[in-house]
Structures are given as structure tokens and as C-alpha cells.
Amino acid sequence: MKRLLTLCLVISMTLSLSAQNNPPQLYLLFEFMLVKGENGSDYQQVEEFWSGIHKQRVADKSILGWDLWSLTPSGTKQGSQFLTVTLFASLQDMLTAINSLDVDGYAKKAYPNKTEKELTAMFDKTGKSRDMSNQVLFKMADQTKDEFQMKVGTLATLDIMKQVDDSYEKAESEIFKPWHQQLVDQGKKGSWGLLRAILPAGSEVYGTHITFSMYKDEAQLATSMEDSGGTMDLMTQLAVKEGLKTREWKEVKLAKLIMTVQ
């Protein structure tokens, strides 16, 4: 009996450690939006309308969540001003949403009191209010251990990277992630993660990965930006130098969460 209890305890501990070392997979659809100045108010109305549809999708368990972020810098020649992020539990769910989403069906569920004419008008306004400049499919490749909870006002830095060596992800996980984990543990940032692009792919793509860091507010972000990050021993400095050779740092954007459905 004692041996049986010990065996059960070992199995339980093994399963627990396996769950910790293999967190649930997460897939993300990034959609970058270009919005002209005169369409700003219409675009906000459009996303509020779509948030109702996304709430229905969460209720139906076809998605895990949806976010709307504003992007900075946002000059007329600096690319997209907004980013929507849709979260999925599997690649199949994400591909299904892209290729065969029943938008009309979800809209009618979300807004049962709206007429067909009213729904059509909102879909027309959607097309006129913004241009979707880029659509990228991602998989979460790695992330820190933390309990950070996103809420409206959360800030995130998005570092767009292009892999130039097959050891890039290993470098992020083994060299840079421990440093980010230390900052998280010290309360200097909320979370860090590495996203791997699934599509588009190929030698001509602009970026292959995004690393993100999340902050609860402007004060935490400013402190992090002004902090040197502390000192490194010689071995760590050499490892960082080699790690930097595995990717090309394309650019960094600052994102602010302005709407979320969970």
C-alpha cells in the first residue's frame, strides 16, 4: 500500500512538472490596420461593433480572446496605426477562422435586434474605415513565467526580428529569456514572450519573429527604458554578443491596449 501511494505521488509530480514545462499552445493572428485621419471615429465604431462579434466567438469557444492595440510611432509614413490580435487554442482553429469564418452568422448572434440592413451598413463601414496592411500568423515559441494580467492601458514593446541563423530561438530562450525573467521577477516588466511567424514565410519576408515585453503603465515602461539592465559578467557578455548575431533587429513599435475581449 505504501509503495502504491509513493508511485501515485511520483506520477502526480511528473504530470505536474510536465504541464509546467509544456504550457498550452497558443496561436495568434496579427492584423495591422492603416486608418486615415478622417476615418478615425468611424474606425473606433467599427471595432466596437466587431468586439460584440468576438465576444460571441469567445462564448462559442472558437477563439480564446481578441485585442485592439494602438501603435506608436504612428506618423502617416510610419505604417499601421492599429493592431488587432486574435488568440486561438490551435492552428486548425486559426486557419478555419481565416478561411471560413461565418461572419454573418456571428453578427446575427451578437446583435439579434439589428436588421439585415443595419448589419450590412456596419460591414460596409468596416471596409471604408481602414485598410488591412498586413496579416501574420504566429505561434508562441517561449515566454516568461509570470502572473501578469493584461487590462486596458497595458503597454507592450514589439521588437520585429528576422532570423539569420538556425540557433536564433535557442539564443532567445537560453541567453535573453533569463535576463527578461529577472526583470519580471524584480517588477521591472510584466511579461516577455517570443512569437514565431508561421505565415507568411520565405526568404523575402520582412520579419520571422516578434519578441514582446509588457508593462502595466507608462511609469513602469519609462523606468525600464531608462534602466541599463544591470551589469553582466564576461561570459554573459560574450554569449549576448554571439546571440545578437543570430538575428537582424528590424524595428520596434510601442503598442497600447485600448480594447479587449477575453
Image: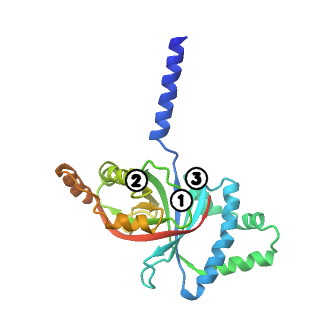
The residue most toward the bottom is 38
Percent position (x, y) of residue 217? 47, 66
Disc marking residue 150: 1
Tally of marks: 3
Q: Quadrant of residue 206?
A: bottom left
At horizontal 26% and vertical 59% (from top left) the residue drawn is 244
What element does badge 2 sit on?
A: helix
How crowded pointer 1 is (Cα within 10 Å; few <14, some 14-19, many 20+) is rated as some
Q: Amino acid at mark 1?
A: Met
- Look at the image and tell me in which quarter the C terminus lies: bottom right
* Residue 233 visible to an observer of this rendering: yes
* Residue 158 visible to an observer of this rendering: no
Q: Is residue 261 left or right of residue 20?
A: right
The answer to whether residue 75 is above or below residue 229 is below
* Among numbered discs 2 and 3, the one appearing first in the sequence: 3
Q: Is residue 172 left or right of residue 82?
A: left
What element does badge 3 sit on?
A: helix
Percent position (x, y) of residue 182? 35, 51
Depth order, front residue of 143/101:
143
Percent position (x, y) of residue 58? 66, 57
* Among numbered discs 1 and 3, the one appearing first in the sequence: 3
Disc marking residue 92: 3
The residue most toward the left is 234
Q: Amino acid at mark 2?
A: Val
* Among numbered discs 2 and 1, the one appearing first in the sequence: 1
Percent position (x, y) of residue 110? 75, 65
How crowded pointer 3 is (Cα within 10 Å; few <14, some 14-19, many 20+) is rated as few
The residue most toward the top is 1
Q: Which residue is mark 2?
A: 184
